[in-house]
Amino acid sequence: MSATPKSVAPARPEATDYLTVETSIRSWLLPTDHKRIGLLFLCATTAMLVLGGLLAMTMRLELLTPESDLVDPLTYDRLFTLHGVIMVWLFMIPAIPSGFGNFFVPLMLGAREIAFPRLNLASFWIYVLGGAIVLGGLVAGGADTGWTFYPPYSTSSSPTAVVPILIGVFVLGISSTITGLNFIVTVHALRVRGLTWLRMPLFVWSIYATSIILVLATPVLAMALALIAIDAAFGFGIFDPALGGDPILYQHLFWFYSHPAVYIMVLPAMGVISELISTYSRKPVFGYHFVAFSSLAIAVLGFLVWGHHLFVSGQSLYAGLVFSFLSYFVAIPSAIKVFNWTATLYKGSITYHTPMLYAFGFIGLFTIGGLTGLFLAALGIDVHVTDTYFVVAHFHYIMVGGTIMAYLGGMHYWWPKMTGRMYPEGWARLSALVIFLGFNLTFFPQFILGYLGMPRRYHAYPEEFQVLNVLSTAGASVLAAGYLMPMIYFIWSLRYGKIAPANPWGATGLEWKTASPPPLHNFDETPVVTHEAYDYTTVMGEEIEVG
Amino acid sequence: MADHAHAETLALRVQFDTAEQQKDASTLGMWIFLITEIMFFGGMFAAYTVYRTWYPTVFAVASTSLNAPIGAANTCILLFSSFTMVMAVRAGQLGQQRMIVFFLVLTLLFGFAFLGVKAVEWKEKFDEHHIPGQAEFHLEGLPATQQATAQLFFSLYFAMTGLHAAHMVIGAGILIFLIVHARKGRYSADYYTPVDVAGLYWHFVDIIWIFLFPLLYLIDRHLGK
């Protein structure tokens, strides 16, 4: 895609970018500018990533030895529950859509703002409120149910503060639903002249597909949580088998949301990867239409596979067969993406900037995560590895190896645009390498542990599993060091980084056609789009920064 | 369009190029919100469907304990409120500012009437010990073995009508907001989008009740006698 300003942009005074246009505290706490709201989301979600990571680190330390020594069993249960709740709802789901999506979707559409800016601001503060309630629940004793809150344990037997956590997650759901709604309307209503649907960047396509899931699935989770909260608070017993209620019904409602939620977490990441692969191989994404529509296909098919979480819960065998078959089906659009990214590299002018390293990491790790997902979709194998570390390793390859890699890749890619400063390339490449190695050392042994039969969610294990657990804990330490490095050099670069040009990567998106950082209403001149996405024939080479 | 941004008004916020584009976006936003509401209530309707299918007799008996004539009256009240809401939107289209206020106030009064009647019905349930989760729960006409299952019906009854009433209360809040602004003359034939989209919401909440009334009060009622 390319934009031709109608005339040469007039010289703009230096101090009018979105960061400096207003500097009061109020303007940062109550901004309606989508870019500032995006930054707020990125800061808040990153803080939650740190918190969730600390909880995980504590668990890994406990698992260093077979005995229960660092924490008692109940504390361990609370740790994995809160780790899940925080990572899923406070980090993974909002990070890329509400963070990068907020910042870049309007820019990529050539729009001045998102469709409903005040609703967008409300989304952020509702997120903060939900987060505060969850963390308040943590202080009040936390929950020990796992992030799935299965009744009847969560409604009657759990000794912990389940209800505040349920309310907190409900509130977080409102925030992400609002954000999804905002994106759908923005994409429909605010595309700039010439930007047809099939000229949109693939990041926008993936955020659009994600928004459809957010809007359709999140309310069902809200209802499921509301019903168990009512059960727990008033003793209603809608899911209580003692009254003839059905706990499996809760599992159906929960996974009707929570399986599509996996795609809420990974689709935006796939959108980021499409941008990175194209930019750093200087080629249009191979099979643009297939990649765009595979996002929608994932969004649709993702709604038809939730039953594979219930293979061993007493669901009918025939339902299990159908869900197993449909789960294989969802691998097709995911594979289309992986193959098309790889094909994009063919004869590309590849540069190995840090974001591209993360993109390579994503493709490899997501492929492992996806293929092991096929093992789990097979009824027979799933029965063997259900609730083992095999499952833990599988979804961490998708969530950490996929989503966090894309999150970090996007952070490096767009850092110059967001802050106006370059990050230090050498340190960034080193940290990408450390993270990749640390990640694999942490989670690959867990595939073996799970296959050997080590169950998840226990604080202690038989001695024969210790070597692999020590490896995993060592890997977690390396991973933590890897995550620490960007936090330091990003903050360092805010003051000492090189000043970023408008288009440091020679990329084609509209977000690179404006200043770094962009002005308050994104563009000095309304752009007009005249080309397909990723048209490198129109990008001049002289702007490219050689890192 | 030399200047990228333009001056901002209520009918034309900075992100939109034309007032029509803004109105379309707002309307689309409200329709998407209503889709989320359908999915939200859908979870509850799914639970209702499962339990109604499993326990048809108990549900039939339990539904006879609800007061159908009062429910029917409340349905009428709500349908009238939808009519007055439509009239408020029409007044907005025509730019009749006083009529907007008049019809919004009428809608609000009908809404309060509905909630009042609902409160009376709930009070009856308390008096008759039809509250699930309470030790003294007892539903006449069912053996002791089925009392537990009867509680499921009332759990759903209170959850569904309670959630519907919560939406009515939010709707009343929106109406009060609109009335205050309409009195200031904020809405005109050029800009009445808030009245329009609030109308969509109000009708949606009505339609939920149109489903709840037969599901809870009417279906198989004759079998339970």
Image (cartoon, coloured by chain):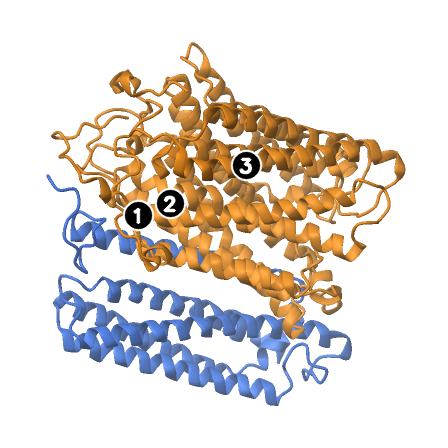
Give the amino acid at mark 1. Answer: Ile
Q: Residue at x 70, y 32 (%)?
A: A475
Q: Colour of chain B?
A: blue
Label 1 CA crowd tier, 10 Å (few <14, some 14–19, many 20+) = many
Residue B145 position (above or below residue A241): below
Label 2 vs 1, first from the N-terminus: 2
**Chain that is coloured orange in the picture:** A
Q: Chain of mark 2?
A: A
Camera-side residue: B12 or A237? B12
Tag 2 secondary structure: helix
* Residue with the mark numbered 1: A114
* Chain under numbered label 3: A
Earlier sequence position, callout 3 versus callout 2: 2
Q: Is residue A152 left or right of residue A192?
A: right
Under tag 3, what secondary structure? helix
Question: Residue B166, percent across and down?
Answer: 46, 73
- Reply above or below: A431 against B43: above
Which residue occupies the foreground of this view, A292 or B12?
A: B12
Do the residues under discs 2 and 1 have CB atoms within 8 angstroms?
yes
Residue A525: x %, y % from top left:
17, 36
* Quadrant (top left, top right, bottom left, bottom right) of the C terminus of chain A: top left
> x, y percentage for residue A447?
73, 31
Pick the residue in front: A420 or A80.
Answer: A420
Q: Which residue is mark 3?
A: A404
